[in-house]
């Protein structure tokens, strides 16, 4: 799939973003995140573990959603809500993760008896993470205060092996936002590229791609997917640079924006602050993200 980074469009999008009030989230919502007063090792265990399994929760076969304690949750929100409940039960200790049973995993990956689509994959990823945390002497042993060092230490963990580093960067965003790690190389911050960020990039036109190919939904190979997402990551890096935004603040905005405004099936263009610079709106065509389904990278 041929992609071209459009620098003129990147400048236009960056200018539009500069007019918005975009701020970092500090990840304090107690429905999803543990108390900041908890021991650092426990907080590290939580974030490293949940990010490890924070990839696509829904497929064309069905969505991961339902009521949890009387409130409706969908997708990643459901995953993090279930994880927060499991945290209080001590599920994220290395020894327990390394020997995680399907019964315990259901607390994380099922809603009202319906399991997430790749239940066994996530079970495997958490077991592997638990074993690697034990080898490292605890979750602190998997952490570094540089992005490169963090990627190197987590590179032995199967959940974090994505060459585009989606989960590494997502974890760094949480660790930085919560004040758990003071990174020395903030110039290496990047957006963690997932489906939402790819779709928004294609629709805005900061990455120019043939829309007909996207509409066909052809499954990309692993190598093609990595190449495409690296292009998307570079385009958002330039948007962050030209707009003066912290890449992690930009990601906070884009992730919410992609779910609530620039949605896959029903974009709400009337609410979009970027509609005047949007290629898709000018064409009246709203392609989805590229297709690469069988992955735990994002």
Image (tube, rainbow, N blue to C red):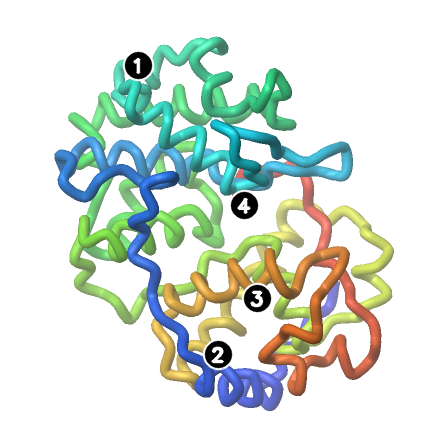
Alpha-carbon distance for marks 4 and 2? Answer: 21 Å
Q: Report the side of 268 relative to 139 (left or right).
A: right
Contact flag, marks 3 and 2 (Cβ < 8 Å)? no
Q: Which residue is mark 1?
A: 96
Badge 1 marks a residue whose secondary structure is: helix
Nearer-the-camera pick, 89 or 56: 89
Q: Which residue is mark 4?
A: 298
Task: Note whether 58 is above or below 289 in the view shown.
Answer: above
Dot 4 or dot 1: first in sequence order is 1
Q: Report the side of 39 relative to 261 (left or right).
A: left
Q: Which residue is mark 3?
A: 232
Residue drawn at 58 percent across, 40 percent down: 74
Alpha-carbon distance for marks 3 and 1? Answer: 37 Å
The tag on residue 205 is none
Dot 4 or dot 3: first in sequence order is 3
| Residue 61 placement (x, y as % from top left) | 76, 33
Alpha-carbon distance for marks 3 and 2? Answer: 11 Å
Q: Quadrant of residue 114?
A: top right
The tag on residue 239 is 2
Dot 3 or dot 2: first in sequence order is 3
Badge 2 marks a residue whose secondary structure is: helix
Residue drawn at 36 percent across, 23 percent down: 86
């Amino acid at each position: 799939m041929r992609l071209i980074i459009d620098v003129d469009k990147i400048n236009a999008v960056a200018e539009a973003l500069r007019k918005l009030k975009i701020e970092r989230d500090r990840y304090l919502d107690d429905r999803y995140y543990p108390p900041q007063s908890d021991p650092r090792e426990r907080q590290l265990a939580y974030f490293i573990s949940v990010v490890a399994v924070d990839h696509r929760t829904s497929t064309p076969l069905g969505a991961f959603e339902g009521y949890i304690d009387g409130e409706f949750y969908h997708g990643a929100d459901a995953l993090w809500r279930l994880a927060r409940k499991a945290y209080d039960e001590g599920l994220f200790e290395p020894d327990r993760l390394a020997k995680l049973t399907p019964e315990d995993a259901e607390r994380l990956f099922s809603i009202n008896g319906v399991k997430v689509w790749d239940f066994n994959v996530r079970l495997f990823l958490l077991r592997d993470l638990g074993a690697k945390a034990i080898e490292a002497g605890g979750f602190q042993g998997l952490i570094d205060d540089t992005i490169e060092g963090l990627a190197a230490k987590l590179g032995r963990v199967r959940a974090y092996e994505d060459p585009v580093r989606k989960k590494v960067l997502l974890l760094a965003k949480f660790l930085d936002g919560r004040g758990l790690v003071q990174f020395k190389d903030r110039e290496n911050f990047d957006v963690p590229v997932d489906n939402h960020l790819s779709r928004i990039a294609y629709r805005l036109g900061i990455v120019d791609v043939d829309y007909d190919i996207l509409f066909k939904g052809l499954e990309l190979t692993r190598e093609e997917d990595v190449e495409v997402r690296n292009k998307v990551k570079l385009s958002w890096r330039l948007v962050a640079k030209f707009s003066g935004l912290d890449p992690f603040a930009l990601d906070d905005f884009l992730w919410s924006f992609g779910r609530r405004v620039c949605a896959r099936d029903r974009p709400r263009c009337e609410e979009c602050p970027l509609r005047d610079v949007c290629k898709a709106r000018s064409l009246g065509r709203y392609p989805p993200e590229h297709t690469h389904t069988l992955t735990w990278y994002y």
